[in-house]
Amino acid sequence: MFNPEYTDLITLKSRAYNLRWAETPEGVIPLTAADPDFPCAPEISEAISQYTSKRYFNYAPPEGLPLFRESMSEFMFRKRSVSISPEKILAVDSAAFGIYLICQSFLQKGDEALIFDPVDFLFRYSVEAAGAKAVSYAIAAGVVDETFSEMELLITPSTKMICLCNPLNPTGKVFTKEELEKLLALAEKYNLLILSDEIWSDIVFHPHTFTSIASLNASAKNRTITVTGFSKSYGLAGLRIGAVMAENPEIYERIVETSRHRSTVHGANVIGQVAAATAMNACENWLSGFIEHLHHMRSFCVESFNQIPQFSCIAPEGCYVAFADIRNTGMTSSEMHAHLLTHAKVAVVPGLAKWFGPGAEGYIRISFATSSAILQEAFERMKSSLT
Ligand SMILES: Cc1ncc(COP(=O)(O)O)c(C=O)c1O
């Protein structure tokens, strides 16, 4: 069972890096990187213990353990209405690497790829690391019924790929089926690949529902490369595990070739794969408890942000991040970040271009995957530092 009030700060302070407990000064509450403050489901640690008790850690198949690939395939069918064979699923050492790998496989100097703005920095990073140009398409926080009509104006003969982040970190938008159909129509018209990052797809708040773009029809499935990971829903970031899926055989083969998994230069470790398979097969109840808690924390954060003068925050439809508009305060994102760190001892992510693109300026992002006690304390401190 998920326990919404259990956070072991002593362990977090020694293990949670990436701008969080282990990296922030004593006394600071880090609402920074989206990595839960909760331990993973006990079923996962039990499965890891059982696996390690045999004391054999041999080479695994380069594309992933059958257990992992079959579990992922069943998960996609059962929960995402996408029928994808296990042979078209590559275990990778994180969603981050999955995005990077797809860009390395299909982009080169002179190419262009469309990315959202704001969006997680990994998209721009990966497109540019492949030598290509990342072209930003603005989707402001709170946009409903996105038509993508303006996106067409950004497409050139060099455009090769649309990078879809659904649900969208940091604004929390969950794209509807109708919106995805419009995006797909553009991809079809200009013969573009779709990279669909669905790492946040479990974290969707009622009444919103998630649609996998590959589930729309055969054409969508044929041009989509889906990436997912287990850091957000199951708290497994340190295990570095994710999956890249493409039903189109030529696309899949090119990704595997680029991955260098067959040469053993790269590959996903077996413990991460066992953990992820257990997450998909045995942790449904734990996940429901986690999402229910997040639903409460979302309401709390949105209400609390909106009580701070000159702050405004729209409820995210998905993701456990709240993206607050601070433009009316007269401070920049950087100034607000510094103010909150110094005067409230709360670390937030400033809406800097380096994290989310230029469209994030004037916003700050917090992660609310923590206990209500920690969030209450953080908001009390933020409010009193600003009023
Ligand atoms: C949209 C998105 N994709 C990918 C990642 C990275 O996931 P992983 O830990 O599997 O590399 C993140 C992490 O914040 C994310 O928000």
Image (tube, rainbow, N blue to C red):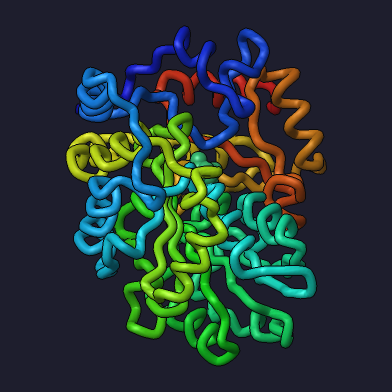
Residue furthest bottom as drawn: 189
Residue 67 appears in the figure: yes
Is residue 321 something that shows in the picture?
no
Residue at the spot 60% in from the left edge and 20% down from the top edge = 381
Quadrant of the frame with the N terminus: top left
Report the residue that reaches farthest toward the front: 263
Q: Position of residue 70 (x, y in %)?
A: 23, 54
Tell me where residue 179 appears, x and y as whole percent: 46, 76
Looking at the figure, which quarter contains the C terminus?
A: top right
Q: Residue at x 27, y 66 (%)?
A: 85
Report the number of numbered marks: 0
Residue 51 screen position, x and y as percent = 24, 26
Taking the spot 59% from the left edge, 89% from the top edge, the residue there is: 190
Q: Residue at x 33, y 28 (%)?
A: 57
Left or right of residue 184, residue 19 in this image: right
Residue 153 % position (x, y): 71, 85
Q: Quadrant of residue 108?
A: bottom right
